[in-house]
Image (cartoon, rainbow, N blue to C red):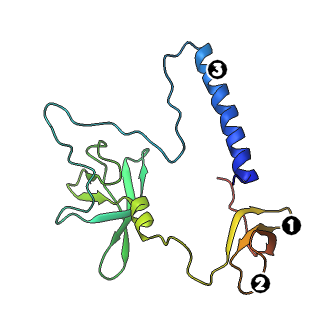
Amino acid sequence: EVTPDVHGHRMRQNHFINKCMLDFKRRNKQWVLLIDVDEYITFNRIDDNNQEPDFPVEKAPDGIPTLMDWTWDSSEGVIEGWIDTLSSPTKVATGSLVSQIQIQPGGVVTDSTGDSYYLRDDRAVRDLDALDQPPEPMPILKYVMADSDDKLCGEIFNDVYDEKWDESWECFEIDWEAPENE
């Protein structure tokens, strides 16, 4: 069954796709690629000198520390992230990078000081660690939105505490602040 939220999304998506295609046709473009935000393209770096790509790899090569939750600061030319040490995670920043070719999950980068780091694919790690479902008995709130009274509202499921009906629309007072726009 298609919910109103999904139906509205599909209507907006089709409208956008049609407008995009008309605009590209008006500009006499030869092709266009339409993808979702969770899809991407990466370049194939196999060439005559390197028949097999050396990245991405699933785990860090021996002797190379793993950077997790890393971010690329293109203006400074450095990557910041966390190395999981035995005692506790340690925040690090690379020196200026010698090459930007392998700045992608699963890549190994070397900075100007000669230090190398493996860039962990955090999305894949989180997907592998994620539960298929919340543990029982855990109420689930779907189609969540904040209303004008600073309440969090959505369809509730599996509420064994207050015995709310599955799929009933419920609002809860939440003590929270919206993030400031940067």
**Residue found at the very far left of the displayed protein:** 49
**Residue found at the very far front of the displayed protein:** 1
Residue closest to the eye, 138 or 73: 138
Residue closest to the eye, 54 or 76: 54
Query: Can you say whether 76 is above or below 164 in the image?
Result: above
- The image quarter containing residue 23 is top right
Residue bearing mark 1: 149
Q: CA distance from mark 3 to mark 1?
A: 41 Å
Where's residue 52, x and y in %?
Answer: 17, 42
What amino acid type should be assigned to the residue bearing mark 1?
Answer: Asp
Query: Can you say whether 33 is above or below 123 in the image?
Result: above
Q: Earlier in the sequence, mark 3 or mark 2?
A: 3
Q: Secondary structure at mark 3?
A: helix
Q: Residue at x 68, y 54 (%)?
A: 181
What amino acid type should be assigned to the residue bearing mark 3?
Answer: Leu
Q: Secondary structure at mark 1?
A: loop
Q: Earlier in the sequence, mark 3 or mark 1?
A: 3
Residue bearing mark 3: 22
Q: Is residue 126 left or right of residue 64?
A: right
Q: Quadrant of the N terminus?
A: bottom right
Q: Nearer the viewer, mark 3 or mark 1?
A: 3
Cβ atoms under marks 3 and 1 closer than 8 Å: no
Where's residue 50, x and y in %?
Answer: 15, 38
What amino acid type should be assigned to the residue bearing mark 2?
Answer: Glu
Residue bearing mark 2: 163
Label 3 CA crowd tier, 10 Å (few <14, some 14–19, many 20+): few
